[in-house]
Amino acid sequence: EAACRLGSRALAAARDRGEGAELPRALELLAYGELRSGRHVRARAHAEEGVRAALGAGQRNVLAHQHAVLALVASLDRDVDTVARHAGAAQEVAARHGLAQAATLAQWALARADLARGDAVRAAARLGPLVGGGSRRGHFGVRMLAVPCWVEAAVLAGEPGGAQAALGEFVVWVERGHDPLGPAQLARCQALLAFGNPAVAESRFEEALARHEGAGGDFERARTAALYGKWLRRTRRPARARTLLRDALVAFERCGATVWAGQVAAELRATGAAPADPEPPGRLSELTPQQLRIARCVAKGDTNREVARRLSVSPRTVDHHLRNVFAQLGIRSRVELARLVDHTESPVT
């Protein structure tokens, strides 16, 4: 949260002073903060602007970081090719300039995309070197953030041995108390590694869900609920599994993680409770020019008051147009609108 506030101030200062050379870096830091806080739509919008700004300023190192952010966001809701394109762009510059952070984030994004599509073996192969020892070890500031993904991938791939060592370092990281998501993620990892002991696994999963309540972050809580639900289904407790899988599905949809939502929907169908298919939304081309401008601003995360200032109209006018946009497109929330705009309009490459 502090990173987002400071990043917003840095960006505002760079814009206000017309400091073109500072703009790409401010956008990079803001996008990283938003990514970590789960504001994925905002992170994508600022990273895409950062790509344009970094290209214009000739700042290739910053460009690599922006592509790494875009790769991580794309691992929630885009096809594998999109993730690979952004990750490849980040790694190309990172390899030449020794940018360990961008390279680690790009590889993490590829692994997360693998996990979203059920390919735990490939995800484990990508993450193992990053969180383990040796010359290929990932950036120290990112490595701990990737450990929960590594544990999940290793366990699902049937290779939990290596995850135990990485978890020891993660315990030290969590005990320092700097990461609000850490305790919940640690309990989830412990549950995964205790699959051979059902009582311990269930206790750790319940602890993880309880800790998520105070930590925020729809995406990580949804991952915990999804993994717990899958485990319950496989231990023949479909009623409780359905409840958790429905919670995970709603949370993934709320934060725009459509690829992960699709995986959970398939798991939910396997419990005998197929989710209803939503009615297809309308098309952006059906909106008036003013409605489209408002929709794009809202999709970037602007409040109605911020949209009003940006477009020089009253907040009441924005509210009126937004209600009409929702009705015309057949959607009910700003998250659905952001997802529709994001999928309809081509991202920066």
Image: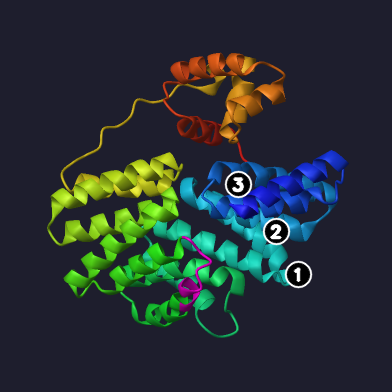
Out of 308 and 275, give the one closest to the viewer.
308
Q: Where residue 18 sits: x, y (%)?
A: 87, 41
Q: Quadrant of residue 332?
A: top left
Task: Identify the mark at residue 46; answer none if there is no mark.
Answer: none
In the rendered structure, which amino acid carries the disc numbered 2? Ala
- The Cα atoms of the two marked residues, 3 and 2, are separated by 15 Å
Residue bearing the label numbered 1: 97
Name the residue rendered at 75%, 49% in the picture. 10
Mark 2, secondary structure of its residue: helix
Q: Is residue 169 above or below residue 6?
A: below
For label 1, the crowd category at 10 Å Cα-Cα, with few meaning under 14, some 14 to 19 and many 20 or more, is: few
Compared across the picture, whether 12 is left or right of 184 comes to right
- Residue 135 quadrant: bottom right
Asked if the residues shown at circle 3 and circle 1 are in contact, with their CB atoms under 8 angstroms apart, the answer is: no
Residue to which mark 2 is pinned: 64
Dot 3: few (<14), some (14–19), or many (≥20) neighbours within 10 Å? Answer: many
Q: Please name the residue shown 26% across and 58% down the image.
A: 228
Q: Are marks 3 and 2 in contact (CB under 8 Å)?
A: no
In percent of the image, x 20 and y 47: which residue is there? 242
Kind of residue sitting beneath label 3: Ala
Mark found first going from the N terminus, 3 or 1: 3
Choose mark 3 or mark 1, whichever is in front. 3
Stretch of the chain drawn in magenta: 172-180
Q: Nearer the viewer, residue 212 or 139?
A: 212
Residue at the spot of label 3: 43
Q: Which element is circle 1 on?
A: helix
Whichever of labels 3 and 2 marks the residue nearer the N terminus, that label is 3
